[in-house]
Image (tube, helix red, strand yellow):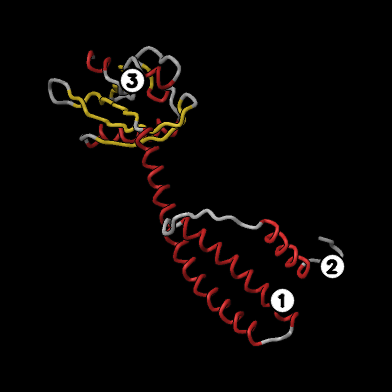
Amino acid sequence: RTLAENLPDYILRVDIKGQVVFVGPNMSGLTGVGTPPAPFPFEDLAWPKPAIASIEQEVCKVFQEGGTRNVVVEAEINHQHVFLDVRIVPETDAHGKLVTVLIVAHDITEIERMQMRLRQSEKMEAIGLMAGGVAHDFNNQLAGIMGYADLLRLDTSDPLLKEYVEGIMKAAQRASDLTGKLLVFSRKNKPEKVDIDVGATVAEVVSLLRRSIDKRIRV
């Protein structure tokens, strides 16, 4: 009892009838409410019903089959999302008869949160690698587009056609810049800061819009 009262874990003792016969003093710190005086039914514990049902199922297995069992419980308790690693240990009397089980619930919430952050980081790394591969493939396609556009520009004397070709090349260059950003995201390239001519960029966008949007819209 002295050990149970000084451990940071949440401790219960349950008999074969499903009655809680001992509750560790720090249980109210988890639930936020006082516990009824022992003995009381296990289901009257101020925990969510699904959590109680999961633990009860393992308690029954211990009484039926013996041995120690573990279950991780995820629940909303006292307005907090917590993860508890619950260990259920059989206790016997002087004659070796199983009479009670000791339930020790260890708070592993912070460990679970760290593992979730690690899994999220691994997902982002995988997305970054995929983005890098897509960016390289896209760059290869853009190189072909820009090459053919450059040949077309050299082969024509039509001013309007040359203007269209220039538009193709500028759009392809913007797409190439976008793939550069994907490569930065995939951590394969270091970000580079460059000065841009905002006025020229806006003029390019306006020129593109004039050819693509409804003529009734004035830009």
Relative image position of residue 112 (x, y in whole percent): 37, 38
**Residue sitting at 53 percent across and 75 percent down?**
143
Query: How many C-alpha atoms fall within 10 Å of the one at disc 3: few (<14), some, or many (≥20)?
Result: many
**Residue sitting at 33 percent across and 20 percent down?**
20
Between residue 172 and residue 49, name the one nearer to us: 172
Between residue 91 and residue 192, name the one nearer to us: 192
Amino acid type, mark 1? Glu
* Mark with earlier residue (1, 2): 1
Relative image position of residue 38 (x, y in whole percent): 35, 14
Q: Give the position of the C terminus as an image quadrant.
A: bottom right
Write down the residue under mark 1. Answer: 163
- Residue 57, picture quadrant: top left
What label sits on residue 20 in the rendered view? 3
Write down the residue under mark 2. Answer: 215
**Residue sitting at 18 percent across and 24 percent down?**
92
Relative image position of residue 116 (x, y in whole percent): 40, 42
